[in-house]
Every structure is written in structure tokens, then in C-alpha cells.
Amino acid sequence: MRRTILGLAGAATLMAATATAASADCGEVSISEMNWASGTVVTAVSKFLLESGYGCTVKKVPSATVPVVTSLSETGKPDIATELWLNGAAALPKMIKDGKVVELTRVLSDGGVEGWYVPDYLVAKHPELKTIEGVLKNPELVGSRFHQCPSGWGCEIANASLIKAFELDKNGFEVFQHGSGETLATSIASAYAEKKPWFGYYWAPTAVLGKYPMVRVDLGPVDEKVHACNADKTCEKVGKSQFPASPVATVVTTGFLDRAPAAAELMRHVAFTNKQMGEVLAWKEANRASADEAAVYFLQNYKDVWSKWINEDAKKKLAGLLAE
């Protein structure tokens, strides 16, 4: 695998050196790198294609949903924000209306799935845990703890609203605030290793839910208006609602769209199904690979997918990789 990565790096250098003047017009591009696994893979794949196929010089900007939306609003950066979970980005529609950003595509074409989960081995013993009513009546069965998503993530706001609406504290639950996606994932792995109770927030596509079977707790019907309010930190009247399937988008600034239309057109086509992303993430975890190594894995094994994203000029530059 290391030889493959080095080979790709060499190919990228060669292709960058022979880029046409038209491609070089792409110039410097900033792209968000969300602080969860699928977000880092999307960015790594996009960065490679932008640099090797379109002559861009790409800078990754580590971020999360709320910070990147704030940055786009206040500074107009980064140029590209990808894997933006719209359920946690309440300010985005106004930014689109005001002409600051443009939504290019749904980068997770199936949409993202969020929810409150318990391990399947608990449900096998206690079927009542399939519903929030059953969980609230039996806090000890799930460890009397709710695992909240990390600070700064958009899901933190919606979860806080639901925690209040379902009165977790009054029903005997401690809310544990995770500091990172890694500790949240580790808590699930640790629970599974010893078949211990666990209850909290997670999402798909992820390697975690691919590896550890979890049951999504029924929080009741989806109420779009309630969820929209729950996801807005200024909302005063929180309510009960299941998480709707979340549209997950790539947005770009209007300045980038005007400045680099060919690169923007590439990003309009970069999209992964949950199955594709789940397979890549499972490989990444099994091989303890970096996001860049996972990107290489995707580029090697899904040529039929990404070859349809790029234009003819980029195909010529990436002909060596496509022919391997």
C-alpha cells in the first residue's frame, strides 16, 4: 500500500508540473476538512482530484458544521465546504438566498442518518429499548448515561433540544459530553467489547455502525418544523421529533464558482452512496489507515465511480491512474 501511495504522489507531482495554463487558473483553493472520518475521506479524494486533474493548489481547513458555516458567513472562507450536514446548518438557507454560497450537490447521495442508538445485544434481551419510552422507563438497562455528540458539532444543538424535550435528567440520565468523534466511537467499541450498556447519538455512514450493529431508537414521528427549531440554538420551544434523513451537501462560495468554474463543476459531481462510503471507512478502520490512504483505496477500487466526475482534460492528466 505504501508503494501505491508513493506512486500516486509521484504521479500527482508529474501531472501538476505538466498542467495546462487553463487549469493553472484554478489557483489556490481552500476546502473544509470536517472532523469525522467520512468528512476527511471526502476532502482527501477531492483534494487529489482538484490538484492532479485541475491544477489547483488546495489547502485543507480543519473544521466542523457550526464553525464552517460561521466562517463562510463572516469571512467567505473556505472556498469549498463539503459534507455539510444541513440539519445542523440552520443559517445556510439565508446565506444561499443572500448569494454568499451555492449548494452544488448532495455529497452523500443517500442522505445522512442520525439518531439515538442502543446496541443490538441489549435490544435482544430487552425489546422495549427499541423505543424512547422503553429507554426512559429503564435507564439502568442502558447505563443511565446519554452519550452526547462532540462539542462544536451541529448535532450538539439538536441533541441538547431533544435531551430537554425528553427530560433525560428527570428520568435518571447523566449526559456525557464527548470532546471528539474519536472518544464517542471508542465508547461504542468499548461497550461492545464487554457487552455493556450504551445509549447515545451516532450517525451513518460510518465504519462504527458498519462494524457494530446498533438499533436506532424510535423517538416518534418526524416533525420537520420541530426538528428545524431543535437544530437552531436560538429556539426556545423545543419539541420531540425523530431525526429526519439529513441532506448532506457540498457548498461553495459564489466567488469560487465564478473564479474556477471547471473545478466547481468537478465538485458538483463528487458524491458517494452510503454503501460506498461505508465500505471505504470499514477498510480504513481495519487497516488503521489515514484519510489519504483511504482516498488512495477509493481511487484504486472505484474508478468506475470517480471517472464519471471529471472532465476530459482531467481524464488525460489522470490517464495513468485510470489505466492501472
Image (spheres, rainbow, N blue to C red):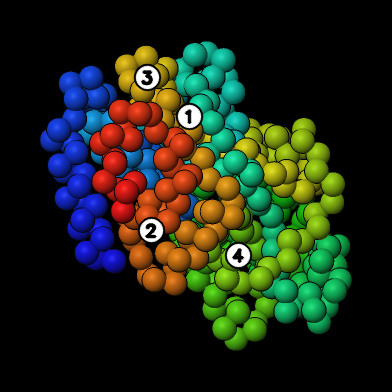
User: What amino acid is found at the position of numbered circle 1 in the picture?
Assistant: Arg
Marks 4 and 1 close (CB-CB < 8 Å): no
In the shown orientation, is residue 214 left or right of residue 4?
right
- Report crowding for label 1: few under 14, some 14 to 19, many 20 or more residues within 10 A (C-alpha): some
Q: Secondary structure at mark 4?
A: helix
Q: Which residue is mark 2?
A: 297
Relative image position of residue 240 (x, y in whole percent): 80, 46
Q: Quadrant of residue 219?
A: bottom right
Q: Residue at x 71, y 35 (%)?
A: 229
Q: Which residue, given by chain and number where applicable, does mark 1 sit on?
A: 268
Q: Distance between the Cα atoms at labels 2 and 4? A: 20 Å
Q: Earlier in the sequence, mark 1 or mark 2?
A: 1
State if disc 2 and disc 1 touch (CB < 8 Å).
no
Type of residue at label 4? Leu
Q: Which residue is mark 3?
A: 261
Q: Nearer the viewer, mark 3 or mark 4?
A: 3
Badge 4 is on which residue?
A: 209
Sequence-earlier tag: 3 or 4: 4
Pick the residue in front: 49 or 126.
49
Report, in whole angstroms, how far the alpha carbon at label 3 lies from the one at label 4. Answer: 37 Å
- In space, the residues marked 1 and 2 are separated at their CA atoms by 22 Å
- Residues tagged 2 and 4 counted as in contact (Cβ below 8 A): no
> Which residue sits at x=53%, y=45%?
272
- Residue 83, horizontal then vertical, whole percent: 50, 41
Other-residue count near label 4 (Cα within 10 Å), few / some / many at <14 / 14–19 / ≥20: some
Q: CA distance from mark 2 to mark 3?
A: 28 Å
Q: CA distance from mark 4 to mark 1?
A: 28 Å
Residue 89, image quadrant = top right
Q: Which residue is depicted at the point 25% across and 36% down?
A: 317
Q: Are marks 3 and 4 in contact (CB under 8 Å)?
A: no
